[in-house]
Image (cartoon, rainbow, N blue to C red):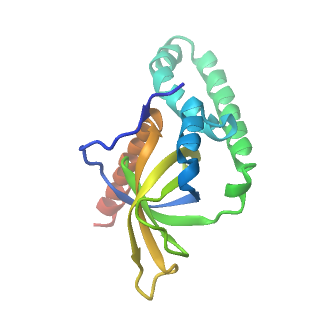
Amino acid sequence: MGHFQTTPERRRYYRIDDSTILSFKVIPAGQVTRAIGRFREGLPEYFSLAANFAVSDVSMSEILGRIRSEQPLVATYLDAVDRKLKLLAHLVMALDNDLATSPTQNVNLSGGGIAFDVDQEILIGSILEIKLILFPEYTGILTYGTIVQSSKNNASSGAPWRVAVNFSSIRESDRDLIIRHVLHQQATWLRRRQLDD
């Protein structure tokens, strides 16, 4: 079982504008304790499979580096097996009905939370269950968050409301995946910008 962060921290996170697949549902007040309790007991394996692979990649990278230098053929084989497992994890995650029909959505993302547009007002203080797929890694993140801001969008926006959500219950390994994703996307953006200058 992963370590969970359930209280807001004072540290700040880098934020990026990103495109993700996002699915959410408001948790009724009477079901919050039960839903978060189930979440802490363990994530649905089908959805967290790719995220668990990504976490294990970090811990295995040093070992794989040594294998590459000592046994290049074995390392090539292990890389092929890893690609197959990741494809399988992506396929299993794609079977999630909530996400299979969800288009990509523009969001503002950080390790501490997410902001996105919605079709109707959601009250400040509401608890959301959020399923998020990060690209290009295709990593699934399941978290619970608290609405901290809900405001009307301007007329040119695609949806009438914008919400900001603080992640209130998230596995620390998933937060780390989001932070790595944000830093990677920032680095990619900076490289593109330097090439354009």
Residue, x 50% and y 30% (percent of image)?
Answer: 55
Where's residue 123, x and y in %? 45, 67
Residue, x 50% and y 27% (percent of image)?
Answer: 2
Residue furthest top as drawn: 70
Query: 6 above or below 110?
Result: above
Quadrant occupied by the C terminus: bottom left
Answer with the quarter of the image where residue 52 lies. top right
The foreground one among 192 and 12 is 12
Query: 50 above or below 195?
Result: above
The foreground one among 170 and 148 is 148
Residue 20 seen: yes
The foreground one among 87 and 14 is 14
Answer with the quarter of the image where residue 15 lies. bottom left
The foreground one among 61 and 193 is 61
Where's residue 168, x and y in %? 42, 46
Residue furthest bottom as drawn: 155
Residue furthest front as drawn: 30
Query: 132 above or below 116?
Result: above
Where's residue 59, x and y in %? 47, 22
Quadrant occupied by the N terminus: top right
Residue, x 49% and y 68% (percent of image)?
Answer: 122
Residue 131 seen: no
Residue, x 39% and y 47% (percent of image)?
Answer: 184
Counting every numbered tag in the picture gives 0
Where's residue 169, x and y in %? 45, 42
Query: 60 above or below 172?
Result: above
